[in-house]
């Protein structure tokens, strides 16, 4: 494996880990665990990315911004994953 392949593999794993953190943060936001220190810690890690899309997709009182953020992040994961093979 070339050095570019190794860098892409490491980048993919880091991005995938961040994607899992995004999903866990969003799921915890719908549970009573919303006020825990763990959730606040996850929000401190994921809010910089999710705030890029804040308020972009709001329909009435429902904010679909996290779905947009997850979809774009999955697209990036797909592109990086495809470049590995």
Image (spheres, rainbow, N blue to C red):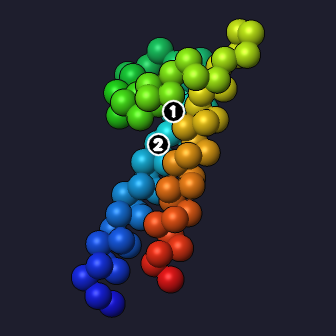
Residue 66: percent from left, percent from top: 58, 31
Farthest-out residue, top: 61
User: What crowding class fits label 1: few (fewer than 14 Cα within 10 Å), some (14-19), or many (20 or more)?
Assistant: many
Instruction: Measuring from the top left, give residue 37's x and y in whole percent.
Output: 38, 22
Q: Are marks 1 and 2 in contact (CB under 8 Å)?
A: yes
Position of 5 with respect to 73 (left or right) is left
85 vs 49: above or below: below
Q: Is the residue 10 above or below the residue 22 in the image?
A: below
- Neighbor class of circle 2 (other Cα within 10 Å; few <14, some 14-19, many 20+) is some
Quick check: 82 left or right of 37? right
The residue singled out by tag 1 in the image is: 25
User: Residue drawn at (66%, 17%), measured in percent from left and top?
Assistant: 58
Q: Is residue 43 in view from this perspective?
A: yes
Residue 10 percent location from the top left of the image? 33, 68
Tell me where residue 36 sits by quadrant: top left
Residue shown at the point (42%, 64%) measured from the top left? 12
**Given the current orientation, which residue lies at the most extreme left position?**
3
Please name the residue that numbered disc 2 is placed on. Answer: 21
């Amino acid at each position: 494996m070339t050095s570019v392949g190794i860098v892409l593999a490491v980048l993919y794993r880091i991005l995938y880990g961040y994607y899992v953190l995004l999903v866990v943060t969003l799921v915890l936001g719908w549970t009573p665990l919303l006020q825990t220190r763990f959730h606040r810690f996850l929000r401190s890690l994921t809010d910089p990315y999710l705030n890029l899309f804040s308020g972009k997709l709001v329909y009435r009182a429902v904010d679909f911004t996290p779905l947009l953020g997850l979809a774009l992040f999955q697209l990036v994961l797909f592109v990086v994953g495809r470049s590995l093979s």
